[in-house]
Amino acid sequence: MEVAGKYDYIIVGAGSAGCVLANRLTRNPNISVLLIEAGAKDDYIWIHIPVGYLYCINNPRTDWLYRTEADAGLNNRSLIYPRGKVLGGSSSINGMIYMRGQARDYEQWATLTGDDCWKWENVLPTFKKSEDHYNGANAFHGSGGEWRVEKQRLSWEILDAFREAAGETGIPKIDDFNQGDNEGVSYFDVNQKRGIRWNASKAFLRQAATRANLEIMTGCHVKRLILKSGEEGLQCAGVEFLGGGKEWSAESTKEVLLSAGAVGSPHILQFSGIGPASLLQQNQIPVLLDLPGVGENLQDHLQIRMGFKVTGVKTLNMMANNWVGKMKIGLEYLLSRSGPMSMAPSQLGAFAKSDPMQPTANLEYHVQPLSLEKFGDPLHNFPAFTASVCNLRPTSRGYIRLASGDPMIAPKITLNYLATEADRKVAAASVVLTRKIAAATALKKYAPQEFMPGPSFQTEEELICAAGNVGTTIFHPVGTCKMGKLSDALAVVDSKLRVIGVKGLRVVDASIMPTITSGNTNSPTIMIAEMAAQFILDSASAKTN
């Protein structure tokens, strides 16, 4: 086995969280860091052109190519489950939407962990710390940070009309989704810079990579953690990994930081002997620590995709379905970095309540001036728009579990979408609300006709079936190494993200969320990494003083 060396900190995964950690820790020249990434460098052109997500998702060059287990809630369908496998992780292939969630999310985290550091008033400055907002600094936004936030460089008549229609149904028009209460309708802000994707690798790792105290190893797949038992209990001393056809080991003198994501982090823990004892035994993995919550508590936002044919208005379907249109689109992007090639997958957003009793908005819309049967399929040959709606606070829970004793075999991903009565009722109500918006006066001149899932679905039972037919992931897996109190049987990390029962090991990524945020999850993951970096530096400082 090759020895990679000895480092103060080893970071497993160069996704959004790993890039932030590498940047913040190596600012101190006396701290040495090894960053290990299974994917390659982010030098693939389609990563950087916003519409290039179409060519990055389900592409082995940039995606882990996971699939979910067949899901009863989706009428026994299995889904592709994209996760970034490249520098920048999922920030290199995602929808680029800048979204924090709502204040209520973080108040709940503080309650579940018993630690007020996770309250909205305390995480807001952390969001602002790394932000570089197009409007500059104010009470809710930061300026000069690494994480660039810009307005989109396009507009669509059909989306403007949807915004007006949402207003007519009681969803207020607002300008900013990131002030703590998201209820309203507006265009999404995006992580772009002058019409080019701004991923975590560009934002945080590019600068850090110039520092002598950071070593980055790409194309390296972590097999397991090196765990040792001593007088003080279980200690993480490093990692073993595969790369370049060789087996490697690396030693950490302070901590290993597991940032492999909501799928990868629990999988590595389980293969290392940390997880539910019965699961490990089934796969002939020696049980070093029976930690039942590892891989459990999986949450995701299920989007119900509703399609409407329209007339008398431009949509991308017709623009992109001929060579002249495609040439115009390409030329516009080449000359001004604007137009459809600069588009995030979803442009207009809306947050609403499925019923008036909800304390805050519990639905999120992603509205697009296009339609297709499923991701990867060609656009339809008729003008249409899609209004996808997701339940922001699902009560269904899934899990990530070992599929094999071989670390190179992907784990089983089971979502259990629509497994609870509450989730099924919200799904049905969201379809009803979407139809109400589509029937509003502002959209009437375009004569919207629902074709997906179709107007034949009317009763609550039929609507739930329809949700199972057209529902799909919106790529927000979280929660599989949840943080919580020591009294929580499913807690994996404490409120400072230290793995319970193991010294020298933290998990720092979306897997630590005890409950999913009310919106897109990438920027909350960056906030989590900022918080973790401060926890780590404060802890190191306390030990030396």
Image (tube, rainbow, N blue to C red):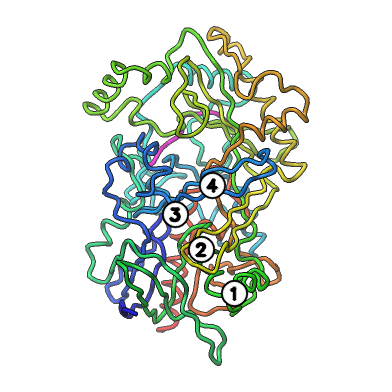
Residue 352 is situated, as x and y percent measured from the top left of the image, at: 63, 32
Q: Is residue 188 left or right of residue 454?
A: left
Foreground pick, 544 / 412:
412
Tell me the residue at 31%/37% (across/down): 49
Disc 3 is placed on an element classified as helix
The x and y percentages for residue 124 are 50, 52
Q: N-terminal of the two: label 4 or label 3? A: 4
Asked if labels 1 and 4 touch by Cβ distance under 8 angstroms, the answer is no
Query: Quick one: quadrant of the N terminus?
Result: bottom left
Image quarter of residue 453 = top right
In the image, which residues are magenta?
A: 184-191
Camera-side mark, 2 or 3: 2
Q: Secondary structure at mark 2?
A: helix
Whether residues under marks 2 and 4 lie with C-beta atoms below 8 angstroms apart, the answer is no
Comes first in the chain, label 2 or label 1: 2
> How far is mark 2 from mark 3, CA to CA?
16 Å
| Three-letter residue code for mark 3 | Ile
Earlier residue among tags 2 and 4? 2
Furthest residue in direction bottom, as rendered: 231
Q: Which mark is residue 284?
A: 1
The answer to whether residue 176 is magenta is no
Alpha carbon distance from label 4 to label 1: 31 Å
Indicate the secondary structure of the residue bearing disc 1.
loop
Q: Residues within 10 Å of mark 1 (few under 14, many from 20)?
A: few
Label 4 neighbourhood size at 10 Å, few (<14), some (14-19), many (20+)? Answer: many
Task: Residue 90: give x, y in percent of width and height.
Answer: 42, 49
Q: Which residue is the site of mark 4?
A: 476
Please give the name of the residue rendered at 71% of the width and 19% of the height, measured from the top-left corner.
456
Gap between marks 2 and 4 measured at Cα: 15 Å
Q: CA distance from mark 1 to mark 3?
A: 35 Å
